[in-house]
Image (cartoon, grey):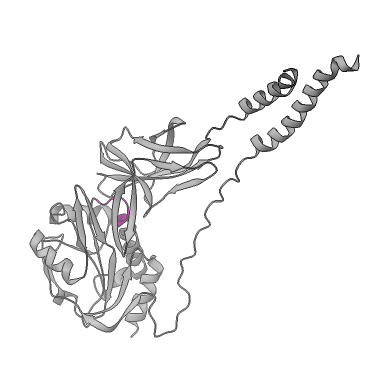
Amino acid sequence: MMLRFRPIVNTVLVVLFLMAVGAIFCLRRPAQPEHLDAVDLTPSPMPDDLFVGDEMVPPVPLAEFDLMNHTGERVSNADLHSKTTLLSFAYTSCPDTCPVMFGRFLGVQEEFGVAIGADVELVFITVDPEVDTPERLQRHAEALDGKWYFLTEELAVMQKVWEDFRVYVEKEGALVGHSNVTYLIDDLGLIRVRYSGLPPTSIFVADLQKLLEE
Amino acid sequence: MRKWFDFGIPLLWLLTACAAKPGIGIEDAWVRPDPMMENAAGYMTIHNSGNADDALIGVRAEFAKMARAHETVMDDAMHRMEAVPRLEIPAGETVIFQPQSFHIMLMGLHAPLEYGQTVSLTLEFEKSGQIVAAAEVRRE
């Protein structure tokens, strides 16, 4: 009698065992990813005589340039003398990285308020002069309320400027690959600090303040 | 033969129940247009909580002429964008689309977007098929 039910008992036992194993295997879900904690990019306290960015030792004189501003006026390196300047490279139709840098400069603009245009100057130089005409740069500055110079010129002129600032530019269709470098220039026209990539606003603000207090 | 029946049927049932499949989920999708509302970039977090790999093989957005997955590659401070025609989303892993990394390139907006509005991004996965993500238009 018992032998007659043995296959059924076996089946039930196997099913129960495998269900237990299966439940552990199938219902095991990979751990839900933890949301990335906000990375604290606030610069660590630095000794008074050090910049957070890469200090140029010795400082390098700003290369000569004479370009067209978004308002149609000429702007040269001489116009930046007696001001502390943050200068970077970007283009207006850039969808991913440049908007981050525009945001960083807007943060600096907000931090320094009325000093912008007086003691502190913010400058962008385009890496896409064939698209970035002064009119287009003007619309861009108005859309962002950016109180900066956004400079352009003919391609041949720009190529010389990029070379002088060690900026590599590769245009591929509507997109432009380019070095993301920013320079902090003192009121004597000397490049004092170089930044690679997209440092947070707080680093620019800290170094600008340090340079202004010299 | 009887033993095969006794043990085989439950095993087959179990294997069928456990068939490997991906489990794609999309969170925190958002879009940042450029200030002149010509192009935009889309960002999101893609989880694969299943037990099989999947891959993102296409993107579509009704509000832009062209949508494509890209990656910003940084090479000695040089930023360039490269198309990513197929992006593996391994089982149990998460791929984050964020500025300076993977992003959805949205070129040629048909009309200006408004900050705060929600737009749809249709993501095509190799195994999971199409998944529509609701993306908020943000300034940053």
- Percent of width and height locating residue A61: 20, 81
- Percent of width and height locating residue A7: 80, 19
Which region is colored magenta? Answer: A93-99
Residue A65 as seen in the image, left or right of residue A28: left
Q: Quadrant of the N terminus of chain B?
A: top right
Magenta highlight on residue A94 = yes
Magenta highlight on residue A3 = no
Q: Residue furthest right?
A: A1
Q: Answer whether residue B119 is visible to the viewer in this image.
A: no
Q: Nearer the viewer, residue B12 or A213?
A: B12
Quadrant position of residue A24: top right
Residue B61 as seen in the image, left or right of residue A63: right
Q: Main secondary structure of the magenta part?
A: loop
Q: Nearer the viewer, residue B38 or B90?
A: B90
Q: How many marks?
A: 0
- Percent of width and height locating residue A114: 30, 70
Above or below, B120 against A78 in this view is above
Q: Answer whether residue B75 is visible to the viewer in this image.
A: yes
Q: Residue furthest front?
A: B1
Point 36% across, 76% down: residue: A207
Quadrant position of residue A9: top right
Residue B73 as seen in the image, left or right of residue A14: left
Point 27% across, 44% down: residue: B39
Above or below, B16 against A66 in this view is above
Above or below, A93 against B67 in this view is below
- Percent of width and height locating residue B45: 47, 45
